[in-house]
């Protein structure tokens, strides 16, 4: 069983920044990948960013150049630095990982960007 706990969400004005954190209950050193997803009201959950064990990152086109995902294996934590936030970034953000044979999700943290 893996627990993921997110923090760092909140209300910010357009153009502002937030940093989300996701701390796992197990060592993330050997996890193949960890990712951030988001779900806006009335929309499907979508991938925002993912980072592999080797540090390779991938981003949704809508956040490229504005968001940065990183991991600190010593702290069992993955971060999502979000800059130049837009109102369309408003959503609940979820941390995710996969440990065979199950997917694991955090409880989500709300990010609201006002115009």
Image (spheres, rainbow, N blue to C red):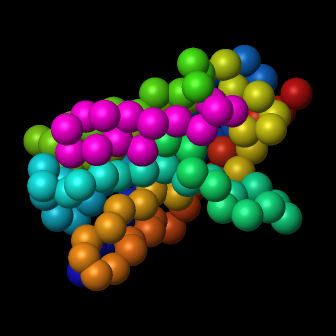
At 33% from the left and 80% from the top, the residue drawn is: 102
Choose between 82 and 50: the one closer to the eye: 50
For residue 20, above or below residue 3: above
Please state the total of marks drawn on the protein image.
0
At 75% from the left and 44% from the top, the residue drawn is: 90
Residue 25 x/y as whole percent: 22, 65
In this picture, which residue range is highlighted in magenta? 50-63
Residue 64 x/y as whole percent: 58, 25
Asked if residue 64 shows in the view, the reply is yes
At 56% from the left and 44% from the top, the residue drawn is: 48
Quadrant where the image shows the C terminus: top right
Asked if residue 19 shows in the view, the reply is no
- Does residue 53 belong to the magenta stretch? yes
Quadrant where the image shows the N terminus: bottom left
Q: Quadrant of residue 78?
A: top left
- Does residue 9 belong to the magenta stretch? no
Q: Quadrant of residue 2?
A: bottom left
Horizontal relation, residue 111 to residue 50: left or right = right
Residue 80 x/y as whole percent: 45, 36
For residue 70, above or below residue 27: above
Choose between 92 and 34: the one closer to the eye: 34
Horizontal relation, residue 70 to residue 112: left or right = left
Horizontal relation, residue 11 to residue 18: left or right = right
For residue 76, above or below residue 107: above
At 11% from the left and 41% from the top, the residue drawn is: 74
Residue 41 x/y as whole percent: 81, 61
Horizontal relation, residue 38 to residue 58: left or right = right
């Amino acid at each position: 069983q893996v627990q993921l706990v997110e923090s760092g969400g909140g209300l910010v004005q357009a153009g502002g920044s937030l940093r989300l954190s996701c701390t796992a209950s197990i060592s993330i050193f050997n996890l193949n990948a960890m990712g951030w997803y988001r779900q806006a009201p009335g929309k499907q959950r979508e991938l925002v960013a993912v980072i592999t064990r080797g540090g390779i990152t991938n981003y949704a086109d809508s956040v490229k150049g504005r968001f940065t995902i990183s991991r600190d294996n010593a702290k069992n934590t993955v971060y999502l630095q979000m800059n130049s936030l837009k109102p369309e970034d408003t959503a609940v953000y979820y941390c995710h990982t996969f440990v065979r044979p199950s997917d694991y999700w955090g409880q989500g943290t709300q990010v609201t960007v006002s115009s």
